Image: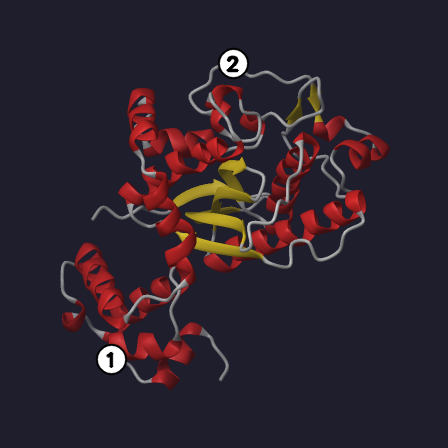
């Protein structure tokens, strides 16, 4: 297994930080339609951007369909990525209510976030996300407006209007927010839709495929939607059994330190445990069992108050 290394990015707050890739899904558990037309899709895309700016994460690629949305983001930790997902749900719910006068339409919509720490899985996720356009009846990904696909491996940089140059009234009407966006690089086209190249971290995606466009397109054509839906939307909502979790930690210990988990000292175990808690769905009890450390010590190491 080849593990994804941390990248360094300047985040929306202006600070440079080590970041990791996360997959966020906003899924209607009862298949409720949350984007009824293009105007709703446009609103969702702008919610993704504004909420990423608010919660200090960077969007790599995204997709919006009628009953769900996906985004791969770079964030310092799972907490920031999860905060982004919940902010998107809250923000978009408010916009949906304002337009249709319907309350609690998104009450059955689940937000889930998973750290993507294996390179093979990362490449599959970055290919899987734009293919969700086919759920909305897309025939050609290049012609579907509501994903970041068009920004990838694209030397053309269309766009007419800088979001940063909008007046307050224009910003509220077009971007549907009162946030100060004077420092963002985002661009709008003639239809006042955001151009994905202006806010997606295309370099991160292209680097994941060794800057080889044919590599990306080959994987895009072969990635299994059913398999990836299971891995990205269903499985992450469930905590792994101890045996599977232990296997992951054993592989990670060998990757990081060249030794099995049982051979590591307390300091190295603590680093692995903190990483696992940040990027995976686990618990103090499970960490205690797998790492062989008492619960009180685990809680102290993770900064959790009992």
For disc 2, the marked residue is 156
**Residue depicted at x 65% and y 48%:** 54
Above-or-below relation of 227 to 292: above
Label number found at residue 292: 1
Horizontal arrangement in the rendering, residue 245 relative to residue 254 (left or right): right
Please say if 144 is above or below 26: above
Query: Height in image: 138 above or below 299?
Result: above
Q: Nearer the viewer, residue 153 or 45?
A: 45
Pointer 2: residues within 10 angstroms few (<14), some, or many (20+)? Answer: few
With respect to residue 131, does 285 lie above or below? Answer: below
Can you tell which quarter of the image residue 43 is in?
top right
Query: Gap between marks 2 and 1, in whole Å?
Result: 54 Å
| Helix, strand or loop status at disc 1 | loop
Q: Judge from the rendering whether residue 245 lies leftward or rightward of residue 40; answer left or right.
A: left
User: In the orientation shown, which residue stands out farthest toward the right?
Assistant: 169
Question: In the figure, is residue 156 to the left or right of 40?
Answer: left
The residue under the point 55% across, 44% down is: 68
Q: Residue at x 39, y 74 (%)?
A: 283
Q: Residue at x 57, y 32 (%)?
A: 199
Residue 117 at x, y = what percent? 33, 50
Q: Which mark is drawn over residue 58? A: none
Disc 1: CA contacts within 10 A as few (<14), some (14-19) or many (>=20): some
Report the number of discs: 2
User: How far across and down, in percent of the image, does residue 107 sit?
Assistant: 64, 59
* Residue 291: image location, x then y, percent: 25, 75
C-beta proximity under 8 Å, tags 2 and 1: no
Q: Can residue 209 be seen in this view?
A: yes
Helix, strand or loop status at disc 2: loop
Q: Which residue lies furthest to the top in this view?
A: 156
């Amino acid at each position: 297994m080849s593990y994804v290394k941390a990248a360094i990015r300047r985040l929306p707050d202006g600070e440079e930080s080590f970041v990791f890739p996360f997959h966020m899904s906003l899924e209607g558990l009862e298949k409720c339609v949350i984007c009824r037309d293009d105007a709703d899709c446009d609103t969702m895309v702008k919610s993704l951007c504004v909420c990423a700016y608010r919660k200090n994460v960077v969007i790599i690629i995204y997709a919006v369909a009628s009953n769900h949305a996906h985004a791969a983001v770079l964030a310092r930790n799972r907490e920031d990525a999860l905060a982004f997902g919940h902010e998107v749900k809250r923000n978009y719910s408010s916009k949906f209510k304002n337009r249709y006068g319907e309350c609690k339409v998104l009450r059955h919509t689940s937000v889930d976030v998973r750290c993507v720490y294996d390179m093979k899985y990362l490449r599959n996720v970055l290919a899987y996300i734009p293919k969700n356009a086919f759920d909305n009846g897309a025939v050609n990904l290049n012609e579907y407006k509501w994903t970041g696909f068009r920004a990838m491996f694209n030397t053309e940089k269309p766009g007419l209007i800088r979001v940063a140059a909008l007046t307050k009234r224009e910003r509220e009407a077009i971007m549907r927010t009162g946030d100060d966006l004077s420092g963002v690089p985002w661009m709008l086209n003639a239809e006042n839709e955001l151009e994905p190249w202006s806010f997606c971290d295309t370099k991160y995606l292209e680097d994941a495929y060794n800057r080889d466009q044919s590599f990306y397109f080959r994987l895009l054509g072969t990635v299994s939607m059913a398999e990836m839906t299971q891995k990205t939307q269903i499985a992450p909502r469930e905590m792994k059994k101890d045996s599977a979790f232990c296997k992951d930690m054993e592989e990670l210990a060998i990757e990081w330190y060249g030794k099995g988990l049982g051979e590591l000292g307390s300091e190295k175990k603590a680093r692995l445990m903190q990483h696992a808690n940040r990027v995976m769905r686990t618990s103090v009890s499970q960490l205690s069992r797998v790492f062989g450390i008492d619960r009180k010590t685990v809680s102290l190491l993770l900064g959790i108050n009992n």
